[in-house]
């Protein structure tokens, strides 16, 4: 028997929902705690009263129930469990999951979770074999969702048989234990499997007019190496990059942006995440009102009025419930590197600042190597010069250890 875990069971609106009562009992017999979210349709098949009596917890359904939000909140619900099990998962639930919907508590939790998700479908064979359902299943498998079943056999409808039955409770329990065990193994190796990492990279281009822009010398190499290192450690990675000429690492989701405002928007759209690393050299200022037409020569030098860009690191580090568990900023300075980095750590409320000296003599901007100082609250660690790939690997390994230590401390 494995050690006790927290399971969030999502019950969908199918005939097989009654089997969940037995499932809950058996999971609790094994020492696991079970919290239940029922879809609205599921209420037609089992009552929250019976489910609540078996779990000893109030059953949750409504995303907009203020009490629920105040007590737990759907984001916490999505994260505070070791496994999310959807059983029975209806054809409609699979479609909504595959489409990334979040229009009820069940789908909002499934979309927001960073925990393993196990799905046990149950439906009429025609629904299961329909190309639309098969497309959705293929998409969900590609997204890393695990499936158990459906089993083949007689349906509740007379005379109907084929694939579509919910697997029996003992098989469900086995699948739950397997999913929990493999999750524990990946967590203890210290890698980033099951984690979402956002990396920003490169410069931003702030338009002056349709053909000119303000920019900086960032090549994006360090950010791309960070994305590659996180991916190598098994994370799902969203790389948000300003204009650069590098090829993105394999297996990474790439979002290309031009301006600081677009970068902030892309970062916010990519949340939630476990780790966010802000390696981009974001322009501090933009032209207040870029010219609509190309500014003509010969009419005297134009006066360009600048205005401040949004502070992406600060915005995300202070984002409340959507703040990633580890927020890492980069500080590129040409003088008093450590002094500025320490100030930045505090004023932005980042967890770590990776500081580097980007004076032209160092060759760091655009170069292959980097010399960094890792600044955390109360400590500075200076690393010797090494390749940007090695810096990236060391940072990501340390980030994985940090999350693992935090998780262990919380247990
Ligand atoms: C009597 C009855 C039985 C149903 N059984 C199933 C089923 O076993 N599987 C399924 O995918 N849908 C079934 N449905 C349809 C779902 O209840 C319907 O698609 C619903 O919108 C699913 O909502 P949910 O995914 O939020 O639970 C059934 C509907 C009725 C009226």
Image: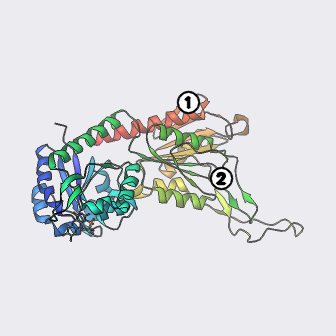
Q: Residues within 10 Å of mark 1 (few under 14, many from 20)?
A: few
- Return the residue at label 1: 383
Query: Measured from the top left, where is residue 221 in percent x and y?
Result: 62, 41
Instruction: Please name the residue that numbered disc 2 is placed on.
Output: 243
Check mark 1 vs ligand 1: CB closer than 8 Å? yes or no: no
Residue projecting furthest to the front: 159
Q: Which quadrant of the figure shows ligand 1?
A: bottom left
Instruction: Give residue 94's quadrant in the image.
Output: bottom left
Residue at 18% across / 42% down in the picture? Answer: 4
How are the residues colored? rainbow
Residue 90 visible in the snapshot: no
Tell me the SS state at disc 2: loop
Q: Residue 117: percent from the left, percent from the top? A: 31, 50
Q: Is residue 127 above or below residue 323?
A: below
The answer to whether residue 289 of the structure is visible from this angle is yes
Q: Which residue is situated farthest in the top direction here?
A: 384
Q: Position of residue 226 (x, y in %)?
A: 54, 41
Q: Secondary structure at mark 1?
A: loop
């Amino acid at each position: 028997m494995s050690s006790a875990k927290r399971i969030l069971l999502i019950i969908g609106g199918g005939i097989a929902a009654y089997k969940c009562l037995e499932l809950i009992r058996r999971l609790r017999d094994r020492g696991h705690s079970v919290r239940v979210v029922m879809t609205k349709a599921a209420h037609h098949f089992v009552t929250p009263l019976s489910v609540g009596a078996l779990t000893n917890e109030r059953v949750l359904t409504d995303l907009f129930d203020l009490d629920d939000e105040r007590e737990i909140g759907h984001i916490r619900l999505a994260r505070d469990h070791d496994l999310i099990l959807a059983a029975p998962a209806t054809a409609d639930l699979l479609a909504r999951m595959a489409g990334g919907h979040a229009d009820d508590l069940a789908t909002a939790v499934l979309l927001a979770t960073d925990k393993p998700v196990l799905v046990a479908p149950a439906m009429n064979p025609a629904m299961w074999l329909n190309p639309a359902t098969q497309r959705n299943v293929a998409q969900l498998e590609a997204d890393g969702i695990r499936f158990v079943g459906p089993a083949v056999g007689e349906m509740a409808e007379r005379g109907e048989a084929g694939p579509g039955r919910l697997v029996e409770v003992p098989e469900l329990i086995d699948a739950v234990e397997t999913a929990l065990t493999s999750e524990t193994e990946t967590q203890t190796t210290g890698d980033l499997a099951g984690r979402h990492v956002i990396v920003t990279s490169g410069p931003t281009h702030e338009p002056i007019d349709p053909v000119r822009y303000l920019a900086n010398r960032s090549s994006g190499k360090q950010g791309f190496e960070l994305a590659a290192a996180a991916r190598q450690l098994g994370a799902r990675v969203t790389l948000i990059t300003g204009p650069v000429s590098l090829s993105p690492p394999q297996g990474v989701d790439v979002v290309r942006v031009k301006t600081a405002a677009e970068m902030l928007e892309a970062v916010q759209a990519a949340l939630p995440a476990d780790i966010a690393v802000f390696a981009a050299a974001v322009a501090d200022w933009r032209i207040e009102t870029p010219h609509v037409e190309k500014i003509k020569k010969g009419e005297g030098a134009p006066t360009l009025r600048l205005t401040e860009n949004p502070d992406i690191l600060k915005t995300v580090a202070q984002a409340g419930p959507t703040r990633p568990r580890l927020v890492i900023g980069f500080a590129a300075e040409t003088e008093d590197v450590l002094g500025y980095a320490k100030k930045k750590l505090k004023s932005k409320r980042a967890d770590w600042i990776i500081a580097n000296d980007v004076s032209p003599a160092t060759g760091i901007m655009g170069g292959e190597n980097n010399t960094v100082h890792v600044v955390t609250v109360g400590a500075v660690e200076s690393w010797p010069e090494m390749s940007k790939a090695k810096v990236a690997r060391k940072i990501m390994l340390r980030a994985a250890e940090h999350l693992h230590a935090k998780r262990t401390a919380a247990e």
